[in-house]
Image: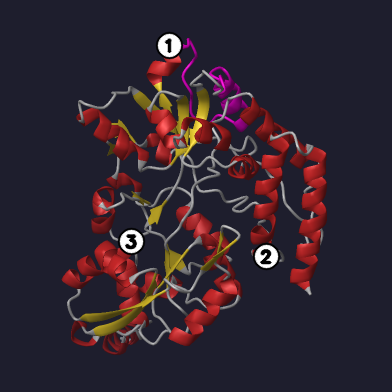
């Protein structure tokens, strides 16, 4: 009898819901997004078709950020102040902002509402939920419907014509650059040139950054007070970068200026055997297959270069739209409905048709892309060991803005034989330390 009474009581009173349901399906949302029209084009129109009684207001960040020294100033302090002033209900955050906002207590934990609703987390690609929980100290403060990554495209015809073995998955940077060197014929007067590897960009300092990402190097000591870029390990990465450009293995600024084409065009025009970039290039390659007036290409793709210490993890995969709810939101229930929509199977299925197309983290909905297997896109897990080159909460992100122009101009001087690598590393060490000390004051 006692058991029956207890069961009846639990049925009558029930457990109080973590977030009260929307009354008659009605609610309001303030969403932070780059641009209002873009938001509705990307997600808002679809959401309001499914939830017509939830009113959405977009708080645009279009004029919030500025460009200084060719680097976008996206300081977390500026964004944090923006959120406090505008009191939104839904945030779209990159990994850096998500990490920083968690440490300042700005975000609402989703664990209780997901437990209450028995929210299904299966089907996300390996590493996504683990990475989000890792950032959240074991708790889940956001969900990420999409991710971005690089793959290494290759021109099969050029490889065969030069009797070079095709690229393979999980190559290291030294392996990729050795392969690229087999094609190295730098452009010069009277020569059109041929290169082994190109990028969607042509800057030498960005190549340096890509190689550095696939290492375990840190810019500072563990407490974030001393810069340590003038070391043998950092020097080896800089030597690798400079040698690859000088030999013609990699297509960068000098080649771009000589041939008056971009890194992607170099790949399309058979002047580069490989191209390291994102998903969108597959669209252009498919368009060229359909357009009979354009040169056809037999192409394939493999994973981007990996860190040999963590061969199952990507150094290029990022969660760029982590959907989160501010801790002080007054519309958490409507915000949760929106986050469920963003991470729904239905939206994942539509990701390949978005403009530009997106990679869903629910990986079962994009097995093929332009007739080719998407396995190289999903073969590597998100990087859980080393998310940023300066993965240290004690180091201001503004240090990037201070170092980038020094590195960019310094590498150009090295390539023009106007400065040695040791001189550049010494300059980065001294001026970077001065900037860091000033930021710490």
Could you tell me which residue is drawn at 24 percent across and 53 percent down?
350
Could you say where residue 15 lies in the image, as x and y percent from the top left? 35, 84
Secondary structure beneath disc 2?
loop
Q: Residues within 10 Å of mark 3 (few under 14, many from 20)?
A: many
In this rendering, which labeled residue sits more in front, label 3 or label 2?
A: 2
388 relative to 435 in the view: left or right = left
* Mark-to-mark CA distance, 1 and 3: 45 Å
Q: Residue furthest front?
A: 189
Marked residue nearer the N-terminal end (1 or 3) = 1
On residue 393, which mark appears?
A: 2
Look at mark 1 in the image and give the residue it sits on.
Answer: 161
163 relative to 70 in the view: left or right = left
Could you say where residue 70 lies in the image, as x and y percent from the top left? 57, 57
* Mark-to-mark CA distance, 2 and 1: 49 Å
On residue 19, which mark appears?
A: none
Task: Tell me if residue 404 comes above or below residue 410 in the rendering.
Answer: below
Secondary structure beneath disc 3?
loop
Task: Tell me if residue 369 comes above or below residue 194 in the rendering.
Answer: below
Q: Residues within 10 Å of mark 1 (few under 14, many from 20)?
A: few
399 relative to 200 in the view: left or right = right
In this rendering, which labeled residue sits more in front, label 1 or label 3?
A: 1
Look at mark 3 in the image and give the residue it sits on.
Answer: 343
Task: Tell me if residue 15 comes above or below residue 284 in the rendering.
Answer: below
Q: Main secondary structure of the magenta part?
A: loop
Task: Name the quadrant of the C terminus.
Answer: bottom right
Tell me which segment is drawn in magenta. 162-186
Could you tell me which residue is drawn at 43 percent across and 85 percent down?
87
* Mark-to-mark CA distance, 3 and 2: 28 Å
Could you say where residue 151 lies in the image, as x and y percent from the top left? 45, 37
């Amino acid at each position: 009898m006692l058991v029956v009474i207890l069961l009846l009581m639990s049925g009558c009173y029930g457990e109080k819901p973590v977030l009260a349901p929307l009354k008659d399906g009605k609610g309001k949302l303030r969403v932070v997004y780059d641009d209002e029209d873009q938001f509705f084009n990307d997600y808002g129109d679809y959401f309001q078709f499914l939830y017509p009684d939830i009113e959405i207001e977009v708080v645009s960040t279009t004029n919030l950020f500025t460009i200084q020294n060719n680097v976008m100033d996206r300081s977390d302090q500026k964004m944090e102040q923006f959120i406090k002033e505008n009191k939104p209900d839904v945030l779209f955050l990159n990994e850096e902002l998500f990490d920083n906002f968690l440490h300042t207590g700005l975000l609402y934990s989703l664990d209780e509402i997901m437990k209450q609703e028995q929210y299904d987390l299966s089907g996300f690609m390996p590493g996504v939920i683990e990475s989000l929980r890792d950032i959240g100290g074991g708790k889940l403060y956001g969900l990420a419907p999409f991710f971005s990554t690089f793959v290494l495209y290759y021109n099969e015809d050029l490889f065969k014509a030069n009797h070079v073995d095709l690229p393979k998955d999980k190559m290291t940077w030294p392996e990729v650059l050795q392969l690229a060197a087999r094609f190295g014929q730098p452009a010069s007067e009277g020569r059109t040139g041929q290169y082994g590897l190109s990028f969607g960009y042509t800057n030498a300092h960005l190549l340096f950054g890509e190689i550095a990402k696939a290492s375990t190097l840190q810019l500072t000591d563990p407490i974030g007070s001393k810069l340590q870029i003038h070391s043998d390990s950092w020097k080896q990465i800089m030597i690798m970068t400079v040698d690859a450009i000088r030999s013609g293995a990699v297509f960068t600024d000098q080649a771009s200026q000589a041939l008056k084409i971009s890194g992607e065009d170099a790949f399309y025009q058979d002047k580069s055997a490989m191209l390291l970039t994102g998903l969108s290039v597959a669209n252009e390659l498919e368009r060229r297959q359909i357009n009979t007036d354009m040169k056809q290409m037999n192409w394939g793709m493999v994973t981007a270069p990996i860190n040999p210490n963590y061969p199952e993890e990507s150094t290029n995969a990022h969660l760029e739209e982590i959907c989160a709810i501010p801790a002080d939101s007054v519309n958490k229930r409507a915000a949760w409905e929106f986050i469920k929509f963003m991470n729904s199977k239905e939206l994942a299925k539509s990701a390949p048709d978005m403009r530009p197309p997106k990679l869903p983290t629910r990986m079962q909905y994009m097995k093929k892309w332009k007739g080719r297997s998407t396995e190289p896109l999903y073969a590597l897990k998100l990087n859980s060991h080393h998310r940023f080159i300066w993965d240290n909460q004690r180091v201001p992100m503004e240090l990037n803005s201070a170092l980038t122009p020094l590195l960019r101009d310094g590498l150009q001087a090295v390539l023009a034989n106007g400065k040695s690598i040791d001189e550049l590393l010494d300059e980065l060490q001294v001026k970077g330390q001065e900037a860091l000390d000033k930021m710490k004051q």
